[in-house]
Amino acid sequence: MCGRYAQTADMRELMEQFEVSGTAPQKSLPLNWNIAPTNPIYIIRGTSPDLATVSWGLIAPWLKNVQEAKNSQSRAINARSESIFEKPTFREAFRTTRCLIPATGYYEWATALGKYRPKQPFYICAKDDKQLSIAGIWSSWVAPSGEIIETASIITQEAQGELEAIHSRMPVFMPVDRWKQWLDPKENNVEHLKTMMVVENPDSLVRARPVSSAVNSVAHNGKELTQETPLGEPETLF
């Protein structure tokens, strides 16, 4: 999965879909059709559960310098499901502080290995138009000044089905009947957690459409970024 997605729901919608009964931010985040690394994002966490805002890109717990920590975030926006349980940056958060990351949709850029023109952007969203429920992890990092910075990463897996034609990776979608266990910090059996990330035919939950390359720039932000752009012959959209 690449490093851009959209979140255009307000807090009330998110709290309703994800059955948030705990705490919530005092202020909503602005609607954002082009979320980039280090931007503030929503996550759902805890057994209540709570809705919280954090920074996108996990900060490794051993980093000491604020600038180094913030620079590292762009390299840790995604964690691979195949290795998250053993990578030093992610493994403790995987065991103890998992979350759900709601997304209205996400962007992916076609690679040369697929049937589409390389670097052609696609917007991918749920077929039922609800929020995508993406598996994630979060963590707290304490700066030398004592400031606590909370951050999160999206968990990805190998792309499946028609999504393989676009890119080799996709997010791990977490089914609603697994939310409670996934968010429970007491659930720390790594083997069981690994099985929870395996979903049959996850590509069947979403639809993809080609969009304008305007999304390539974070300076562009609006609903028009998600509007379909014709590919032209001989390329076709599934």
Image (tube, grey):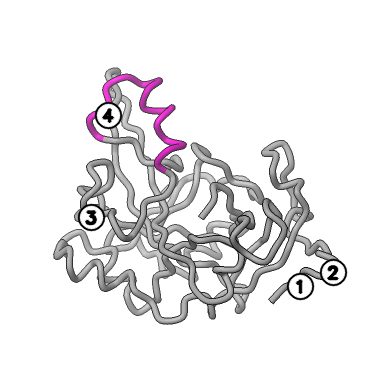
Compared to residue 175, the image places residue 94 above or below, namely above
Q: Comparing marks 3 and 2, which lies closer to the viewer? A: 2
Q: Nearer the viewer, residue 81 or 68?
A: 81
- Residue that mark 4 sits on: 142
Q: Which residue is mark 2?
A: 233
* Amino acid tagged 4: Val
Label 1 and label 4: CA atoms lie apart by 49 Å
Q: Amino acid at mark 1?
A: Thr
Between residues 3 and 186, which one lies in front from this camera angle? 3
- x then y, percent, for residue 73: 42, 35
- The residue wearing badge 3 is 85
Tell me the CA gap for discs 2 and 1: 7 Å
The residue pinned by badge 1 equals 236
CB under 8 Å between discs 1 and 4: no
Residue at image position (46%, 62%) is 171
| Residue 83: % across, % down | 28, 55
**Residue depicted at 23% across the width and 64% down the height:** 184
